[in-house]
Image (tube, grey):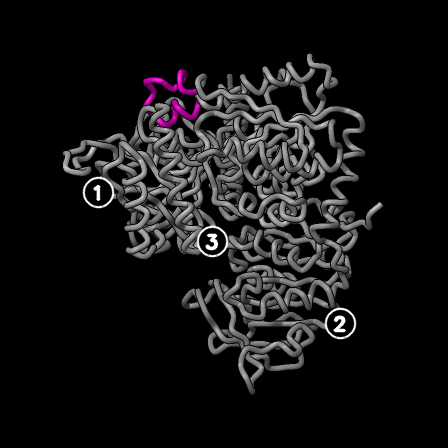
Amino acid sequence: MTANIHSDKILILDFGAQYTQLIARRVRELGVYCEIWAWDHAPAEIAAFGAKGIILSGGPESTTLPGAPQAPQEVFASGLPILGICYGMQTLAAQLGGATEAADQREFGHAEVDIVANSRLFDGLSDHAGAHRLDVWMSHGDHVSKAPPGFVVTGSTDRIPVAVMEDETRRWYGVQFHPEVTHTKQGSALLKRFVTEICGCATLWTAANIIEDQIERVRAQVGEDHVLLGLSGGVDSSVVAALLHRAIGEQLTCVFVDTGLLRWQEGDQVMTTMAEHMGVKVIRVDAAERYFTALQGVADPEAKRKIIGRLFVEIFDEESAKVTAAGHGQVKWLAQGTIYPDVIESAGSKTGKAHVIKSHHNVGGLPEHMKLKLVEPLRELFKDEVRRIGVELGLPREMVYRHPFPGPGLGVRILGEVKPEYAELLARADAIFIEELRRADLYDKTSQAFAVFLPVKSVGVVGDARAYEWVIALRAVETIDFMTAHWAQLPYDFLGRVSNRIINELRGVSRVVYDISGKPPATIEWDRRPAGFLMKWFYFTEMIEETSQPFTSEDTAYMRRALQLAAHARDAENEVPVGAVLVLNDEIVGLGWNRNITLHDPTAHAEVMALRAAGEKLTNHRVVGATLYVTLEPCAMCAMALIHARIGRVVYAATDPKTGAAGSVFDTLIDPRHNHRLQVQGGLLAGESATMLREFFRARR
């Protein structure tokens, strides 16, 4: 029996900051378990959690406005150490008798904090010789103007007098900057001081301990039952396979569907690694012909994705029946590679809270007729933790740390119709590109790199003959979160070498081009994917586990606020429940909800109301680069208003099959003929919005 690696833990209350998950990752890197819960979580559960310390995250709200989120009073009554970061510090001050105020100018970027009094939190920490001064990263509008009773101001900057405040007696601390980001040089040391010294947490959260803990849990959970896993060859499903094999051995059966749309020779590599070297029982299904037949004549990317997803489910279902019929025992469990960010993002569909780590929630839409129970050994882990565990389990580092790959595979990197010969050309071109990146020590310096097959032919000269052959595009980007990205400025000689190899080694390619588009306005992948569409049939087997999450925790927090406004429209004004939140530079500048009936105004949609509020606040009809979060896909009227306002990004929850203008009925928001283009993403908390709308109209029938 391993030690209880969850015994010493930190609770992070999330106020909607973009960096909240980063706080959790930094704490876990210290070897301490932590969880992220919503700021308004049930106080009784907070007390029952048994944390040794609490961190209050940053957030986009303002403590100077009515209704601002607050930490539950039970947090202060707990007697636990508390660290407030940015907004967390501000609400700490506001709730305990201090004061906050809006700054004349928001502060983003580097700053220097002078430690002006004795500080347990910063003792011995400095970035400047001869001065107790720290280089930190700021991102705030409001700031604390007066520390609460019992607190001592221990740090300040040239712009804000209260940058750090401490109540050593109660072990409560507030910092205006972000220690979780790497720009704050002593950030990790500060968090370590708080977590391990002040809170007294032991460092039990290690890769080896996590593996042993999960082995015990899995054995207790499944007993003698058999488990089925859809193995894609991606990071998450491979780690799940290795972990479950160590835990239950022959009780695990993996189904690997070779679609013909994988990386070059990936099917053989998966079988070599998992079946031959690790001894995992893997059923390989060669389904390439079946896929290419189904995709024949299909050029639309969305149609291709649906076909690929449907076929995978059919094949997986067939193989599940075969496993049982072959005498491997009744399959009762489906293994899934759900990871912690999936849990955080999907949380709240029933309770509205972020803490669902203990419940079994099928994030991906398991086919109902399969009636399988879920085993999710990675659901407490971040991606970087999954990778470390993979290496600890003996998986090749090259497999564990490779770049993201879309669930539908090369099917969405071949623009237009998918043919076997196109797939082979693309797979080989992609392999050459990746091989050269590794050889030049550039692979780990790019976040994602791949090749794209373009369905156009270009004139070239091969030998002494004129050639009319295909074009391959190369794409490489650098990014932190995959929400925005810069094109990687690879050396010209390197690109020339890759181009020469592809053209010389692949018959049928006469031209290679390099994509130098950033995101936005371009997306990282080339095909036009309805943003937020996660291919739920694929999700349950982790076919897309390497694809970056399309929404951040901050996106989720803003959409939750929009859902609150939608509920207000329903409950207070008997309006159709649609809410909207408009955000500019991490600040809410406009709130709106449907008010057509109340105002006798057919244009008073939630989006328009939010735009009007922003216009008054900013004294400008333009809200250039802002993000609008709305609980229902905008109609054509609202879409044109958003375009005229020069909104940068629209994130919506549920689709509107009757009037939606983001692709459901009209393409107004995404029509390339406009002189202004927006980034559009849909599907965030769609289930909650759809349920609210459905129940609203059902009650009025």
Q: Residue, x 77% and y 55% (percent of image)?
A: 8
**In which quarter of the view is residue 306 placed?**
top left
User: Where in the figure is residue 419, as x and y percent of width and height?
Assistant: 35, 23
263 on left or right of 520: right
User: Where in the figure is residue 380, as x and y percent of width and height?
Assistant: 67, 44
Label placed on residue 675: 1
Q: Is residue 699 magenta?
A: no
Q: Is residue 301 magenta?
A: yes
Residue range highlighted in magenta: 291-306
Marks 2 and 3, the one that precedes in the sequence? 2
Look at mark 3 in the image and give the residue it sits on: 444
Per the image, label 2 sits on a secondary structure element best described as loop
Q: Nearer the viewer, residue 178 or 485?
A: 485
Three-letter amino acid code at disc 3?
A: Asp
Three-letter amino acid code at disc 2?
A: Thr
Q: Residue furthest bottom?
A: 130
Q: Residue, x 59% and y 17% (percent of image)?
A: 317
137 on left or right of 385: left
Are the residues at dot 2 and dot 1 in contact (C-beta closer than 8 Å)? no
Q: Residues within 10 Å of mark 3 (few under 14, many from 20)?
A: few
Label placed on residue 169: 2
User: Where in the figure is residue 172, as x and y percent of width and height?
Assistant: 69, 66
Label placed on residue 317: none
Q: Residues within 10 Å of mark 2 (few under 14, many from 20)?
A: few
The answer to whether residue 609 is seen in the rendering is no
Three-letter amino acid code at disc 1?
A: Asn
